[in-house]
Image (tube, grey):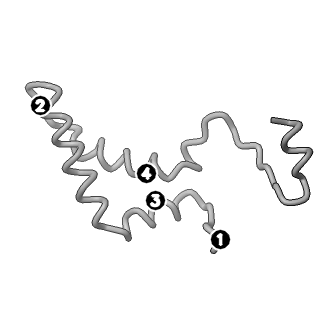
Amino acid sequence: MREFIAANADWLTVFQLPSYAPDLNPQEGIWSMVKRDIGNLAAADLSQITRAVKHRLKQIRYRPDVVDGCLTGTGLVMDD
């Protein structure tokens, strides 16, 4: 990888991130909301948990403001 980076340094910029940085990962915000919503679920089996998670993810998918908020919370910026 180092050789590839060095060979393409004219157009490639590499940022070394910590091995685990949940504050830089917008997905962590999404999963936090899902876990908060199903935290008190007394599921009878795994399929009930799966349905609850899928249902909540589907709700979030239709709320772009929530998804954008998770991205904004990281402090990262998407360039056009």
Q: Which residue is mark 2?
A: 42
Nearer mark to the viewer, of 2 and 1: 1
Tag 3–tag 1 contact (CB < 8 Å): no
Image coordinates of residue 63 in percent, x first then y, are 31, 67
Tag 4–tag 3 contact (CB < 8 Å): yes
> Mark 2, residues whose alpha carbon is within 10 Å: few (<14), some, or many (≥20)?
few
| Amino acid at circle 4 | Gly
| Amino acid at circle 2 | Ala
For residue 42, above or below residue 68:
above
CA gap, disc 4 to disc 3?
A: 5 Å
Sooner in the amino-acid sequence: mark 1 or mark 4: 4
Q: Which residue is mark 3?
A: 70
For residue 12, above or below residue 68:
above
Image coordinates of residue 79 in percent, x first then y, are 65, 71
Asked whether, in this view, residue 37 is left or right of residue 8, the answer is left
- Marker disc for residue 29: 4
| Amino acid at circle 1 | Asp
What is the quadrant of the N terminus in the image?
top right
> Mark 4, residues whose alpha carbon is within 10 Å: few (<14), some, or many (≥20)?
many
- Marker disc for residue 16: none
Nearer mark to the viewer, of 3 and 1: 1
SS assignment at label 2: loop
Q: How many marks?
A: 4
Find residue 3 and report its image quarter.
top right
CA gap, disc 2 to disc 3?
A: 27 Å
